[in-house]
Image (cartoon, coloured by chain):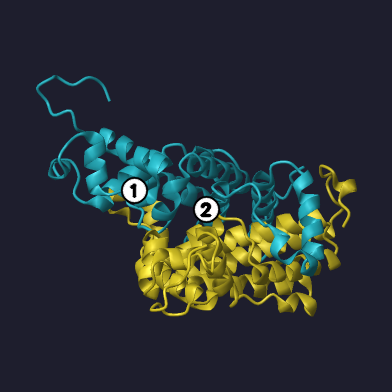
Chain colours: A yellow, B cyan
Amino acid sequence: MGRRPANETPLNRDMIAAAALQIFDEDGAAAFTLASLARKLGVRAPSLYNHIESKADIVELVREAVASAIDASMFGSLPWDEAMTKWAYSYRAAFAAHPNTIQVLSTTTVAAPGALRKYELVIAGLTRAGWQPAEAITVMMAVEAFVLGCALDLVAPEQMIDTTAAASEVPVLAAALRAAARSQGRSDEVFADGLEAIIQGLRLRLAKPRRPRRNSHADRP
Amino acid sequence: MGRRPANETPLNRDMIAAAALQIFDEDGAAAFTLASLARKLGVRAPSLYNHIESKADIVELVREAVASAIDASMFGSLPWDEAMTKWAYSYRAAFAAHPNTIQVLSTTTVAAPGALRKYELVIAGLTRAGWQPAEAITVMMAVEAFVLGCALDLVAPEQMIDTTAAASEVPVLAAALRAAARSQGRSDEVFADGLEAIIQGLRLRLAKPRRPRRNSHADRP
């Protein structure tokens, strides 16, 4: 690895994480490169390699910073469905604070220890509640997909559908959009209602005799 | 679309849409600029403005192209919950074919006539089934958020969680991931199970506050 010239600022991983997150927040995901990060930190790009191994390593630092706001502790005390709901809200809020990170964090392998420890709490809570281990992963990922889809919506413009270009052809849609516009906080409502539906559906599935699943008998911790 | 006389400009909106989509697919969202599009088409950038009004206009052409694979016709014939399920599958497949368009299409206002006409079918189907117009918008957007969150997952690596960095601290998670890895098609399973849960939750909501509904309560196998 390279050596840091004496005239450069000492670096540490926290500083690198903060600078990387700042680039995502202020300039967008496309602006995040090793070169832009080095520039932001006032160092030469090779100096970064004294502290990080790769660009993927920095993405994990960013993940750790974003995920630090996610609360999964309630899986230790609340029923799984209530815990899942609260976890989903805090998850969405964490990404809402850094929407430009959604695409990269949702499409790269999670390896950050802090994020892993939170997943552990979720899966432990779900399995204690009666979900099979493999099912618990599926349930967690399904709720996560919904949260991320809703978080994308937070970066979207207030008016998500504009019927102007086909107004005469879509009268029912246009009227429904006018009715929906009168209810406040569309994004919040979509998230709240959708989450309630998915949790309710999952409650029913857990309560019912299980349908046969591939390899379900082999699923042992 | 058909042959054109040699003396006409070879550029048209369909060609622009195809070239733009090709840039997204092959080079990623960050590579999509008016300059790269002009280069791909072999014209100067100002020539594009004979056919399109703005970059946003091209995004709508891309949306039209991606959305053309989405099928909403079943809302005219099937019960809303079955139609919604089939719509969600075709929606996910459409974005799965062009994953690099997800971020931009999910964070910009929908104005493309073809996409609007499909929303019209969805909302008309939902309101016929008894959903209030504003509720229908919320329901459609909640399912859409889930679909988009799942579509993001399609661009993710096969291994979505790597416990190496904290293995001793996350034993339950690690065991559950090993169990889940034995079931095939993780992404497909998360999508199928999550969609089933959300539709089931929505069925209950539609049945509850209003008069009891007798159709469409059958569980899927």
Can the viewer see residue B114? no
Q: Quadrant of the N terminus of chain B?
A: top left
Callout 2 crowding tier (Cα within 10 Å): few <14, some 14–19, many ≥20 = many
Earlier sequence position, callout 2 versus callout 1 = 1
Q: Residue at x 18, y 49 (%)?
A: B53
Q: What chain does badge 1 belong to?
A: B
Answer with the quarter of the image where residue B221 lies: top right
- A110 left or right, relative to B167: left
Q: What chain does badge 2 belong to?
A: B
> Which disc is residue A107 wearing?
none
> Which disc is residue B31 wearing?
1
Q: Which secondary structure lies at badge 1?
A: helix
- B85 left or right, relative to A45: right
Q: Work out whether residue B200 or residue A46 is closer to the camera in this orientation and state it.
A: A46
Q: Is residue B51 above or below residue A129?
A: above
Q: Residue at x 42, y 59 (%)?
A: A176
Answer with the quarter of the image where residue A53 lies: bottom right
Cα distance between the residues tagged 2 and 1: 21 Å
Q: Position of residue B203 (x, y in %)?
A: 66, 56
Q: Work out whether residue A116 or residue B19 is closer to the camera in this orientation and state it.
A: A116
Do the residues marked 2 and 1 share a common chain? yes
**Circle 2/circle 1 CB separation < 8 Å:** no
Question: For the residue marked with disc 2, what is the amino acid?
Answer: Leu
Can the viewer see residue A220? yes
Q: Which secondary structure lies at badge 2?
A: helix
Q: Position of residue A124 (x, y in %)?
A: 80, 68
Mark 2 = which residue?
A: B148
Q: Position of residue B16 (x, y in %)?
A: 26, 37
